[in-house]
Amino acid sequence: MFARMERDKKVCRVTLLGSVVNLLLLVFKFVAGVLGHSAAMIADAVHSLSDFVTDLIVIVFVKISSKPEDADHAYGHGKYETLASCIIGLALIVVGVMMGYNATVKIVDVVRNGTELASPGIIALAAAVLSIVLKEWMFHLTRKVAREVDSPAVEANAWHHRSDALSSVGTAIGIGGAVLLGSKWAVLDPIAALVVSVFIVVQAAKILSDAIGQLMEKSLPRDVEQRICEIVYEEEGTSDIHHLRTRKIGSQISIELHVRMNGYLTLREVHDKSIAIEKRLRAAFGDSTYINLHVEPLKSEY
């Protein structure tokens, strides 16, 4: 229980810090985009708004997922974290598609109709540079916490910070080029927004794919399952692992397997060996790992 409370505190601290950063950047980017006549910066502000909203989602869903098992949820509430990752992935896709659409409309308008776009101002460039520094810092900090607490939702949120940093890099290149080269090159601003939107959608699709895989009970990677078998075989007298089923439940994993042992062992001996195997597995994959171990006699003893 104490470990779970500490985990929640770490998640809440880094997510609240991220929400404060996102709120400040949201306001600054929007003002800079309007005053600096930058479509890319306004699009970046919308991206920061989505970051702020997903921060709130992470806090709420991680809090729910930390609730212990109950009569209706024998495996706990860890799937809520995975659901939060789905929501973040969908939000990123919507933001990326909207950014790409708006940028494409402006580019087509310039190419077909020769429309002259307003050249972005220095304030928009300053906002982009500030965003790159702050969001890249938040990415590394959030990802560090995500790996410490093994949270898919916090990991997804970290990549949301990184996508915002990449968004600002593209924005800075577009705005910088437009500022330095003059109004004739102002089209670089929406071009930068279009390129950034592609990066965002690609990363969002990966987050969403991983989360859907967990919701659909996708097995753990082959190398992890191989490690599970190696740990089980460390116990003397175990053989023929079969019916191995693994899955991710939020930040926890579930392992179900059948194993064969000498059928002439006493019940106490089989029990002790089973406990030893479970201890090794939990030492490797965490104390909260769900383990369902079924022991059968050797085939030759039937």
Image: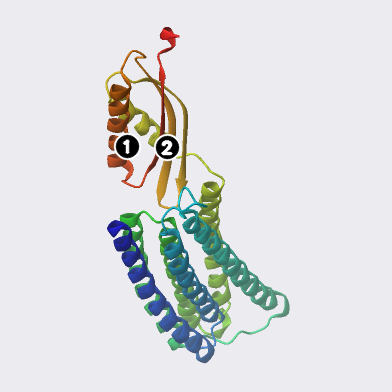
Residue 247 % position (x, y): 47, 42
Mark 1 secondary-structure assignment: helix
Up/down of 130 relative to 257, above or below: below
Please say if the residues under marks 2 and 1 sit with CB atoms less than 8 Å apart: yes
Residue 131's tag is none
Q: Which amino acid is tagged 1?
A: Leu
Mark 2 secondary-structure assignment: strand
Residue at the (58%, 87%) spot, across then down: 118
Extreme residue in the bottom direction = 35
Q: Nearer the viewer, residue 21 or 45?
A: 21
Residue at the (31%, 60%) spot, across then down: 144
Q: Is residue 186 visible?
A: yes
Q: Nearer the viewer, residue 71 or 92?
A: 71
Extreme residue in the right direction = 113
Classify the position of the C terminus by image quarter: top left
Residue at the (42%, 37%) spot, across then down: 255
Q: Which amino acid is tagged 2?
A: Ile
Q: Is residue 170 visible?
A: no
Residue position for label 1: 281
Residue position for label 2: 255
What separation in Å lies between label 2 and label 1 (alpha carbons)? 9 Å
Residue 224 % position (x, y): 39, 37
Q: Can you tell which quarter of the image residue 253 is in? A: top left
Q: Residues within 10 Å of mark 1 (few under 14, many from 20)?
A: many
Up/down of 293 relative to 253, above or below: above
Up/down of 121 relative to 264, above or below: below
Relative horizontal placement of residue 57, taking residue 252 as reference (left or right) = right
Up/down of 41 relative to 63, above or below: below
Q: Residues within 10 Å of mark 2 (few under 14, many from 20)?
A: many
Classify the position of the N terminus by image quarter: bottom left
Please report whichever mark, 2 or 1, sits nearer to the chain's N-terminal start. Answer: 2
